[in-house]
Image (tube, rainbow, N blue to C red):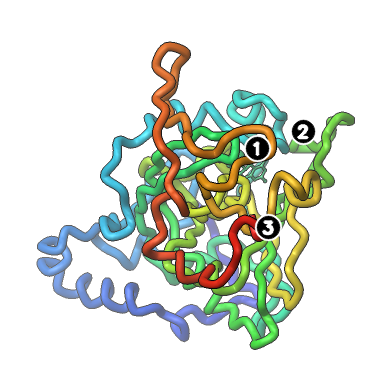
Amino acid sequence: MFIKKRPSWALPHFAITPESVYLNRRQFMSGTVAMAAGLSMPGLLSAAELPVQGETLDFISMPRYSTNEKKTPFEDVARYNNFYEFGTGKDDPAKYADEMTVDPWSVVVEGECERPGEYALEELLKPYEYQERVYRLRCVEAWSMVIPWIGVPLADILKRLRPTSRAKYVYFETLYDPGQMRGQRSLFSTIDWPYQEGLRMDEAMNELSFLAVGLYGKALPKQNGAPIRLVVPWKYGFKSIKSIVKIRFQEERPKTTWEMIAPQEYGFYANVNPAVDHPRWSQKKERRLPSGLFSPNWVETVRFNGYGEQVAHLYKGMDLRKYY
Ligand SMILES: Nc1nc2c(c(=O)[nH]1)N[C@H]1C(S)=C(S)[C@@H](COP(=O)(O)O)O[C@H]1N2
Ligand SMILES: [Mo]
């Protein structure tokens, strides 16, 4: 069991209860309402849970944000990964991510906001009820999965940190610890660690942007970015940065890992777009996992990965060939 200490920088969480938690408290008081609505009982307890490896999480499912497509089996989601901190092979993360410790975990918040500090993960998550959202994930390498994530909307957490008017972008950083991440010890690594990503503020505040702490009803497997990772389903998978230890609000557009490695191939925006091919391959189709040699399961790639209704307005007037 986690022992809660309340450090001086911690927020008084009662001051910032979001509407959803408030509603759940009310439903908790009249349990029948919660039961009738099919909500997990009792919302209040699940709100403070720290995702613990291998343990199940309470959540409310969000059909409004979920696709009905066939889910990619857990075995594929947890065994076919990109997490270069543990090696470049697809099966390296599942083999070696266990060498990383995820409890305790804290996230440093800095830059243009009123509440900078170092937050224990459970402090950051405390006010919220977890949601389940079944999203498509489309990798720039032309494969895709359908994953039932568990987590909280990114906007809820960012708003609580009170970004100032100068905050135009938000930057994220993955853990840098070569002692625990063998890929960071590799002499052949092309990545200048730590892995870095970023979003424009309005992208980050979009209703689809999500911080996942679990999948398939349990805490995130380490290879999927435990204990907390970003999920931006309308963008290529590399934007969905794993194992986050830093969030920074800033005025300038951040440099991001893949853009720094090969700017002509990977842009800052990285919106899924079948009309803009990767210089070395087509982006018109994708292999939907599970995919085998004899049944590759190719499907058409859709603009914004099928989330145009929610996000197309963010890019009005922008030439997405130029801002790829
Ligand atoms: N820190 C970090 N985050 C990362 C990566 C990585 O190598 N390191 N790979 C990205 C890429 S390319 C993809 S497709 C997704 C894959 O997420 P999954 O393994 O959970 O499916 O994670 C993204 N986040
Ligand atoms: Mo990817």
Q: Position of residue 263 (x, y in %)?
A: 77, 50
Q: CA distance from mark 2 to mark 1?
A: 9 Å
- Residue at image coords 53%, 78%: 159
Q: Which kind of residue does numbered mark 2 sit on? A: Gly
- Residue at image coords 63%, 31%: 93
- Residue at image coords 45%, 47%: 214
Q: Position of residue 15 (x, y in %)?
A: 46, 86
Given contact means CB atoms under 8 Å apart, are the residues at marks 2 and 1 in contact?
A: yes
Label 1 residue near ligand 1, CB within 8 Å: yes
Given contact means CB atoms under 8 Å apart, are the residues at marks 3 and 2 in contact?
A: no
Label 2 residue near ligand 1, CB within 8 Å: no
| Mark closer to the chain start, 3 or 2 | 2
On the picture, is 154 further left or further right than 161? left
Vertical relation: 137 (above or below) 292: below
Residue that mark 1 sits on: 83
Vertical relation: 227 (above or below) 72: below
Q: CA distance from mark 3 to mark 2?
A: 24 Å
Q: Nearer the viewer, residue 23 or 54?
A: 23
- Residue at image coords 42%, 11%: 294
The image quarter in which residue 23 lies = bottom left
Q: Position of residue 215 (x, y in %)?
A: 42, 44
Q: Which kind of residue does numbered mark 3 sit on? A: Phe
Graded by Cα atoms within 10 Å as few (under 14), some (14 to 19) or many (20 or more), the crowding at tag 2 reads many
Graded by Cα atoms within 10 Å as few (under 14), some (14 to 19) or many (20 or more), the crowding at tag 3 reads many
Identify the secondary structure beneath mark 1.
loop
Residue that mark 3 sits on: 268
Residue that mark 2 sits on: 183
| Mark closer to the chain start, 2 or 1 | 1
Q: Quadrant of ligand 1?
A: top right
| Mark closer to the chain start, 1 or 3 | 1
